[in-house]
Amino acid sequence: MNAAGILQIVLYFAVLTAAAIPLGAYMARVYSFERTWLDPVLRPIERGIHRLCAIDPEAEQHWTAYALACLMFSLVGLLLMYALMRLQAMLPLNPAGQVAVAPDLAFNTAVSFTTNTNWQNYGGESTMAYLTQMAGMTVKNFTSAATGMAVLIALVRGFARRQSRTVGNFYVDVVRSTLYILLPLATVVALVLVAQGVPQNFDAYTDVVTLEGGRQIIAQGPAASQVAIKHIGTNGGGFFNANSAHPFENPTALSNLIEMTGQLLISAGLVFAFGRMIGDRRQGRALYIAMALMLATGIIVTYWAEGAGNPALSGIDLAATDQAPGGNMEGKEVRFGIASSAIFATTTTATSCGAVNAMHDSFTPLGGMVPLVNIMLGEVIFGGVGAGLHGMIVFVIVTVFIAGLMVGRTPEYLGKKMEAREVKLAVLCILIFPLSILGFGAVAVMLPAGLAGIAAPGPHGLTEVLYAYTSASGNNGSAFGGLSGNSWFYNTTLGAAMLIGRFLIIVPTLAIAGSLAAKKIVPPSSGTFPTHGSQFIGLLIAIICVIGGLTFFPVLALGPIVEHLLLGAGTLF
């Protein structure tokens, strides 16, 4: 660790906070149907979309209708994307002549982009046609992100409303999320990325002869438009196989900062929007501080672990090895260095983005454990757009329930009593996640089909499998690397984990929203536990860490922790 690296971390948080606060104010106005500065341009377009799609903006939905609309919207999108990949060989905008995607891979990919996971068992430039990338991946990046944002807003309305039977209209919320927030931000970011050197064209791949006399095919395509929304929408699916380590996706230090900030921008802004929409900005600030503290801790630990280098090389003449004297540079872009790679790896897993500018498989065991733990905590350290905050609110419900037990009172949050129904639904949301990770992971390390994909047997191989199902269940999409996931077994089971991690959490979350919307708002009393101060922030962080620690520590001890101890003793995997 050095002063330059620390300065990068401080600069990153300063830029993020400075951008998130005004964006949060703007999004609160969007979702409260107040006038914004984009209304003169976008309002006529919005009305036109409503007429075209037969959406009645005045007709609100009960939470069950809202959930059904969410599920049907996602299902139709999944089927259309699957068909697009299977038929791409017969469709236009395919200059490289890409063939039809295999059925199991098409299923995995369609599920992945529908659930905002964007796990990729394929190389974009070697598998997908331009039309598939644009009409499939890029479009789903918008719609899956908008779906998560809509679910969050329904939950926020549950807190803000009193004795209401409805939580909004899913289709109206998706249209507003896309039209007023995602599209404007993605357009600006895409233009900046083009200026930085990210390609945006329909040119055929370029066949060149290198200086050494070898032959190289340079892939191009409409990359900037997909790269922009992959970060803004916390999607993470790369246009190219190397993702943001590829110079066409992330060419400069400025593009790297923009992409890292974009990964958290909407998620962080929604926290401030939450405070405004419920009429108590202190609540939003408290959640932001809790998330930022956990994120900063993860960044510092990762930076320390990677900066310290490989413990197996302790006492060895570094000049005689590939180990850089400044730390562990294996798997990292020399353009960005250790500090920037640590920030990127931590932020991409603290959200559900999953984009990478370095290979997590090449991190030290402890450095690689931090991204894994970020996802295991439930993707609540900002998390995916919408999904992260509604996951954090689930933990808030559990926290106020425990606090209520301590003082012998019915727990309350934002004037709503948290009764048995809400607590049970919150616990259900929390339990689904580890059941998916540990259940599928156990099956994978027992069956030959699962073991066949492991490149490095031992604790490192266990971490590879564990990371894959954690990433899928958490709808993150980043890969640890080393695991051969493009097989019928992993394509199918990872796809199932993505569906579980997305929709078996969305449905109980909307049930909580409906239950809360029907309740009265209870005025605070002398016995009400304040939920905006440092005591609550500390308790909330402790609850998140204890639940995550108790659930996953045993398997972490068998994976990255034991690998770290053995690595220091000279045992390599």
Image: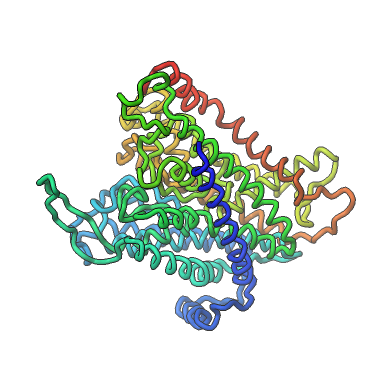
Instruction: Kindly give the residue lying farthest to the left in the view shown.
Output: 213
Q: Quadrant of residue 323?
A: top left
How was this image coloured? Answer: rainbow
Res. 104 in view: no
**Vertical position of residue 156 compared to residue 549: above or below:** below
Q: Position of residue 307 (x, y in %)?
A: 46, 34
Residue for point 37% across, 20% down: 316
User: Where the C terminus falls, by quadrant?
Assistant: top left
Instruction: Kindly give the residue lying farthest to the right in the view shown.
Output: 526
In the image shown, does 48 or 499 lie closer to the viewer? 48
Q: Position of residue 556 (x, y in %)?
A: 51, 28
Answer left or right for 499 relative to 273: left
In the image shown, does 312 or 33 lie closer to the viewer? 312
Q: Position of residue 289 (x, y in %)?
A: 66, 49
**Vertical position of residue 306 compared to residue 491: above or below:** above
Residue for point 52% across, 63% down: 69
In the image shown, does 183 or 115 lie closer to the viewer? 183
Q: Quadrant of residue 415?
A: bottom right
Instruction: Kindly give the residue lying farthest to the top in the view shown.
Output: 569
Number of numbered discs present? Answer: 0
Residue for point 61% across, 30% down: 550
**Vertical position of residue 514 compared to residue 333: above or below:** below
Residue for point 56% across, 49% down: 10
Res. 423 in view: yes
Answer left or right for 494 relative to 157: left
**Vertical position of residue 446 compared to residue 207: above or below:** above
Q: Position of residue 77 (x, y in %)?
A: 41, 61
Answer left or right for 567 relative to 394: left
Answer left or right for 540 relative to 355: right
